[in-house]
Amino acid sequence: MSQATGTAYESDRYVGKVAAVTGVASGMGRCIALRLASEGATVFGMDINAEGLHQVAAEAAALAGAGGTITTRVTDIAEPAQCRAAIAECVDQHGRLDVLGNIAAVSWMKNTADVTTEDWRQMFAINVDGTYFMCQAALPHILASEGNIINIASNAAFMGCAYLVPYCATKGAVVQMTRALATEFVKEPIRINAIAPGGTDTPMNRDYQLADNTDYKLLKRSMAFRPLDKPEHVAALFAFLASAEAANIHGAIINADSGMTAT
C-alpha cells in the first residue's frame, strides 16, 4: 500500500529511470513525483515553492519499500534560462533523463475586461513557455534514452469556459504543442503525449476565487456532473503512460475528466 496515494500496487517499472517533473510541491505534481518514486524512479522535482519541495522529498524518503528518491531544485519555469539550467543539473546529477513531466501551471477566474497585460503574460509564461522550454531543453536527453514527455493539458483546452479565457488559451496551446512535437519526432524512438484532466481536488482548485459578479448560469456550463477527481488518479495514469506498457501511445491527448468533454 502506498502511503503517498493510498492505492495498492506493486511495480518496479521505473527502477533505473530518471524523471524530471515540474510543479512537485503540491497537487498533481506532488502525487506524480511520489508515485514514480514509489515505483523505483529517481525523480528530479522542480517548483518555485522551496518549502513544498522539502516536504515532498521528505515524504519520498519516508515511503516504506520505495526504491526511488526525489531530489529537488527551486525553479521558476517562466524563465527559459532556468528551464535549461534545471534540466542540465538533472542530467549532471543523475547521468540521464528518461521522463519529463510538465505539470506546473497556474489558473484563476477573471472577467475578460479585468485581465491585465501582466496577468495574460504571466499565465502564458508559466503554462505555455515553461512547458515549451522544458521540452526543448529535455529533448536531446530524451532522444538519447529513448524516453518520453508527458504534458498536463486540461478539459479547458476543448471547452469554452466563462471567466477562464487566458487559461483555456494556454491549455489549448499545450494540446497543439504536444501534437506538433509528436509529429516532428514521429520517426524517432521517443513518445510525447498529454493528459487532459478535469476539475481535480488540488490546493489550487480548493483555493479558487470566482470572478466578480459571476453569472452562475454561464459557470454551470463548465461544471462536472461528478465530484472533483483525485490527483492520485492522474498520477496513476501518468505512471502508466510514461512506462513501457504504453509503448504504442504517441501524440495522444488523453482526457481524464470524468466525462466533461463527452457530454
Image: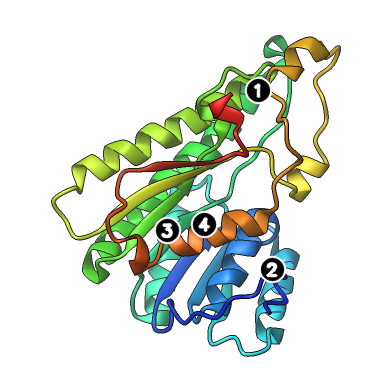
Q: Amino acid at mark 4?
A: Leu
Quadrant of residue 116 within the rendered picture: top right
Tell me residue 222's x, y (percent). 68, 22
Q: Secondary structure at mark 3?
A: helix
Q: Which callout, 2 or 1, points at the residue further toward the start of the chain?
A: 2
Which of the labelled discs sits on residue 164, or is there none? 1
| Residue ID for mark 4 | 237
Cβ atoms at labels 4 and 3 below 8 Å apart: yes
How far apart, in angstroms, are the residues tagged by discs 4 and 1?
26 Å
Query: In the rendered view of the protein, which quadrant contains the C terminus?
Result: top right
Cβ atoms at labels 4 and 2 below 8 Å apart: no
Instruction: Give the number of marks.
Output: 4
How far apart, in angstroms, are the residues tagged by discs 4 and 2?
13 Å
Name the residue furthest right: 213
Q: Which callout, 4 or 2, points at the residue further toward the start of the chain?
A: 2
* Eye-nearest disc, 2 or 1: 2
How far apart, in angstroms, are the residues tagged by discs 2 and 1?
30 Å
Query: Is 228 on the left or on the right of 156, as rendered?
Result: right
How far apart, in angstroms, are the residues tagged by discs 3 and 2?
17 Å
How far apart, in angstroms, are the residues tagged by discs 1 and 3?
28 Å
How far apart, in angstroms, are the residues tagged by discs 4 and 3?
6 Å
| Residue ID for mark 2 | 5
Tell me residue 49's x, y (percent). 70, 59
Give me the residue at 25% from left, 58% from top. Answer: 190
Q: Secondary structure at mark 4?
A: helix
Cβ atoms at labels 2 and 1 below 8 Å apart: no
Tell me residue 115's x, y (percent). 68, 18
Tell me residue 69's x, y (percent). 56, 82
